[in-house]
Image (cartoon, coloured by chain):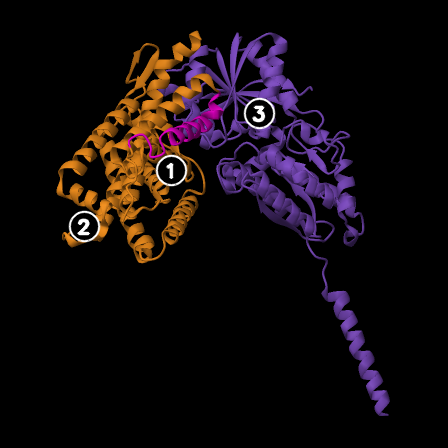
Amino acid sequence: MEQIIAQLPQQVINGLTLGSIYALLALGYSMVYGILRMLNFAHGDVFMVGSLIGWGVLQLFIKGGAVAVGTPAVGPGPVLVFMVCGAVLATSALGGAIERFAYRPLQKGSRLTTLISALGASIILQNVAMLLTQGRAKAYQTELVISPDWAISALGATISATRIIIISVSIALMLAMDYAVTHTMLGKAMRATSQDREAAEYMGIRTSRIISAAFVVGSGLAGIAGVMIGLYYTQVDFMIGFSAGMKAFTAAVLGGIGNIRGAMAGGLVLGLAESLGVLFLAPVYKDVIVFSVLIAVLILKPQGILGKPLDEKV
Amino acid sequence: MRNLVRFVSMVTLITCIGTGIAYGKELPPVKIGAQGPFTGDLSKIGLDALNAIQMAVEEANAEGGIKGRKIEVAIGDDMGDPSKGVLVAEKFGMDKNVLGVIGPMNSATVSAALPSYDRAGLVVISQSATNPDLTERGYRVMHRICPRDDAQGPAAARFIAEVVSAKSVYIIDDKGAYGQGLADQVAAALNRIGVKVTRGQITLEDRDFSPILTRVKAVQPDLVYLGLSNPAQAAGLMKQAVGLGLSARFMGGDCMKEKDQLVAGAGGAAEGMYITAIGRAIAEVPAAREFVKNFEGRYGAMSVFSGQSYEATKILIEALRVAAGDNPAGLTKAKALDAVHNIRDYKGIMGFPISFDEIGDVVGASIYVYQVEKGDFREVIEYPAEV
């Protein structure tokens, strides 16, 4: 019992860190589902590509001698910004391209067709990444960008700068997303499209652009999440998209799929459940804990934590 | 007259074809199967082994192959995955020219592939599979030139108690045949000595080690033992430990001894880590100087199992030569198996004469403990491999 209490603060921090990454990823699932009623299976792999691009940018800096142990020529801030920008540019473009070439041509078909196309896109991304990385794990030199010495210790928990950056960046992004969806024209158009695409088109909204925008924004967020997971796990490989994608999708369902705030809440709940569950059960069972939470929530509240009961469409 | 012409031309034709067969047809090459993880996380270890196997075969071909028959390497990539390992074994088993196999390299793949190899009667020499059970299961085809985990585990425990003088140890394993097997051996030996042991597990797919490390931190052990088969995973774990402010010593098993993924991958976090090895660093064995020079000249710095792979290939070729006798055409899998089994005191590059015991385990090997120092492995101590 004493040991459990001693671990509590650290596991809460672990859970928040992981949860905020899940939340960012869940946003992408939820936005696309909200508008198209389809599961974008390739989302997890877009996230993986983001993390690998971030890694590539970091390697360029290291090769150029700009980042090194002891006397870095460039501070950590600019390097991080470049890593994130590189990843976001790549993943946004990738997300847009996947929508344009894998989904849009099939929109008139059944929903199952796009689902299979999404699976195909996911497999292609994974295999290309496997070939390019020779299937090997790539080490993120987090210690060169964010010094492990920058850490706060409180109540027996060590909060490294990496964790603080991950949590604060995610929260800032989520607040921005929430504001954008509720207060901007694009957000209004998105909500309108998700409620009734045909009616939105009658109102003069170019819904195909809105759909593109949802993919581009969601994939960009996945790119940021990818760099953050790299900094947090300190290594990435071509497979990380699958498990992270599963968790994020679970988070989206948990929070009420299609609901932006729900996705954020779902992500955080999931991350915390995973970390706090480990206090009582062996860490190998962490995925069991996650999916048990999902089942429990779906039994008690089938529409998810923040989801509204689905209105019958006429 | 016409009949005579016909008869003569017929005879000439048959004679021509007959001589053509007798002189034109060479014996097919003898194939040696190479099975290991040639792609995936463990590919560095696997490809270095493959290079060493190919080098040994090239050298043997330059000396005339097997009594005039050329030797070829058949490549079977299993990615360290047991299910793929079975497929490779089935494929090699069906090829009648494959007369022996070097590998598989991972305990889990050996375990999965053995029944197939046994059915085919195809002799196997693993250079690196250490799980004790593999030779105990009664498969005659199984041989290995590395000592077992029930020698490695006690040696690690002895080192932990006598040299590190740790009072409490946290053991993390990956639930794999190798990782958990080795962790069990270390835990049992530590319990016998009276060192306090706490255990925890992760899975082979895990990339987030904060949950287990937070548990480790609460126990405050003197040393953390890693029963992991993937050095990249160990590197990630040690880096995340730094992020959590955990400052324990780390120790791991033989397959950790890989500079690229472990030392470079951990970016300094591996410094001071202890590693048990199932063979001496080949560069330090006088008999291996020639091999090291040739290998590094061609492929660059070698990783942990290159020497063992070269040695295993040489032993197999030697056995095939014995089995062939004066009749290379009469080589069979059964003869190759007997010849490998009866190898006695083969003197190669490992620094000790190699023989196999009744069940196919190597006799006379040692366990070595290395420490990561300034990004390199330094030998600390040698223990005889005793079960």
Q: Chain of mark 2?
A: A
Q: Chain of mark 3?
A: B
Number of marks in the image? Answer: 3
Q: Are marks 3 and 2 on the same chain?
A: no
Label 3 environment density (alpha carbons within 10 Å; few <14, some 14–19, many ≥20): many
**Residue contact at pointers 3 and 1, CB within 8 angstroms:** no
Q: Quadrant of the N terminus of chain A?
A: top left
Q: Secondary structure at mark 2?
A: helix
Q: Colour of chain B?
A: purple
Residue A268: percent from the left, percent from the top? 31, 26
Which is more foreground, mark 3 or mark 1? 1
Badge number at residue B316: none
Query: What residue does disc 3 label?
Result: B180
| Residue B193 placement: quadrant | top right
Q: Nearer the viewer, residue B294 or A196?
A: A196
Give the distance between the C-alpha atoms of the residues marked 3 and 1, in whole angstroms.
28 Å
Amino acid on which disc 1 is placed: Gly
Q: Which residues are magenta?
A: A282-306
Q: Secondary structure at mark 1?
A: helix
Query: What residue does disc 2 label?
Result: A200
Left or right of residue A130: residue B310:
right
Residue lying at the far bottom of the rendered structure: B1
Kindly indicate which chain is depicted in orange in the rendered structure: A
Which is more foreground, mark 3 or mark 2? 2
- Magenta includes A289? yes
Left or right of residue B69: residue B261:
left
Q: Nearer the viewer, residue B70 or A146?
A: A146
Query: What residue does disc 1 label?
Result: A245
- Magenta includes A88? no
Label the magenta part by its dominant secondary structure.
helix
Amino acid on which disc 3 is placed: Gln
Residue B165 drawn above or below residue A129: above
